[in-house]
Amino acid sequence: MKFWARTFGKPQTEGHVRDEIHLRRIFIMIAAGWTTAMGITYSSAFYRTRIGALELAREGAATAYAKDALYRRWNTQHGGVYVPVTMTTPPNPFLQDVPERDIQTPTGRRLTLLNHAYMIRQVYEMDPNGPEGHLVASHPLNPKNLPDGWESKALESFSAGKTESFAVMEMRGRRHFRLIRPLTLLPGCVPCHEAQGFKAGDIYGGMSIAVDMAPYEADARGRLTAASTGLTALWLLGLGGIGAAWRPLGNRFRERQKAAAALSAALAAKEVLLQEVHHRVKNNLQTICSLLNLQAENLPDIAQQALEESQRRIRSMALVHEQLYGSQDPGELDFAEYTRSLTSDLMNAYRGGREGVRLRLDLEPVLLGANQAISCGLILNELVTNCLKHAFKQSGSGEILVELRTEGEKTVALRVADDGAGLPPGFDWHESNSLGLRIVAVLTRQLSGTLVHQPGAGASFTLTFVKP
């Protein structure tokens, strides 16, 4: 928390606290991702180093095997090799049936014959710290060449066609890499093993090599330590880079938070101001209606009727501001809801003598700004008023239809129709002296819209205009 506060400063509000918690989580996720990547890299390096040590040990064992196989072939091709008899190289008792196993030079030196198995064993005994190797067979002439448990299983696998076996195991308290490959009977070896039923080319045993893993594992530990040091430094450098990169990012984030908070406060203030304006305009319009009502008390009936129509026009405008004042967005009005309220008020105002008149509404949700809503509301007021005043004078019953829908993304269509008497023959509403229709024409031009009268039974007008 202290690091975060030093990097990004102290949060301002609850919203800022939530945002900074989210930002902190992103930072932690990036750091965790970097740590995971470094962990995977270390695991891969550990695995490669371990496998590399085994491969090097295997190569060492394979090299020793190749050398032993070459010694064996050379020795066999020459029928063995004579060496002086010493305390460490006595005559081979298992070759006592071989003619001229022991000979004497003209000077009196005693020599004895070494076969390949005896020679290879003595070579390995000369270097106790190097690889270990010897010949093994299930039925050897020399009991020293008997296999151990692991070698016995390997010899059995050679009979099944396997070409080598290897494993890492403990030998005399130290880990060794062991390799064994099959040996085939060479022609020079047949005389010694013919009595056992072997012939040239038969698999009669194997060459077993053991390599001490200590030097390879020590080298692997050294390389792994170097890799760990480098990866740890890279991991810390990466974390430092992430922290350094997030400092300016945190500052920019805080600046954006402040700007967003300022913008939000300004918008809230604007909404409050708009609501207050709508509220005051609505009250002023209602005051005007009240004054007109007082004025009409002492006027003739025709003047009272004119003032009442003016009052209804003013109420249609006041209703716009009333609904804008109560809406969540003071800048837009749900004109479908407005239509329901206005037509209901008009039906109640002209109810006397027109109880049989029905109102049918077919409205889609349409949002309009204040200016278009006032103009469209006044047009709706005039058209519905004309239906109520003139369409049903004779019948006293019928239906008024109000439709509101959108065409495309921005075009709005408002239709007012009735099934009453209709317009008089030859009547042109464009040339009418009626105040209501003149108001409709003026407001249609203000909306940059069109008002079309559809011929047929009753009267039908459709207003179309485009939202900004």
Image (cartoon, grey):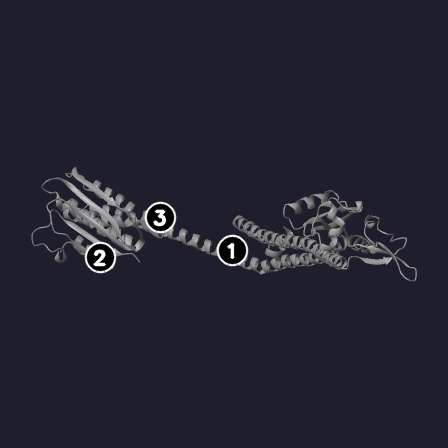
Distance, label 2 to label 1, CA atoms, is: 45 Å
Give the structural element (helix, strand or loop) at label 1.
helix
Pointer 1 residue: 257
On the image, the x and y values in percent for residue 142 come to: 80, 47
Pointer 2 residue: 444
Q: What residue sits 56% from the left and 59% below the top?
A: 249
Label 1 crowd (10 A; few <14 / some 14-19 / many >=20): some
Distance, label 3 to label 1, CA atoms, is: 30 Å
User: What amino acid is found at the position of numbered circle 2 in the picture?
Assistant: Thr
User: Is 354 rendered above or below residue 265?
Assistant: above
Question: Which is more foreground, mark 3 or mark 2?
Answer: 2
- In this view, the residue in front, 426 or 230, is 230
Q: What residue sits 24% from the left and 48% below the top?
A: 404
- Reading the chain from its start, which is encountered first: label 3 or label 2? 3
Question: Which is more foreground, mark 2 or mark 1?
Answer: 1
Label 2 crowd (10 A; few <14 / some 14-19 / many >=20): some
User: What amino acid is found at the position of numbered circle 1 in the picture?
Assistant: Gln
- In this view, the residue in front, 275 or 28, is 28
Q: Is residue 433 left or right of residue 312?
A: left
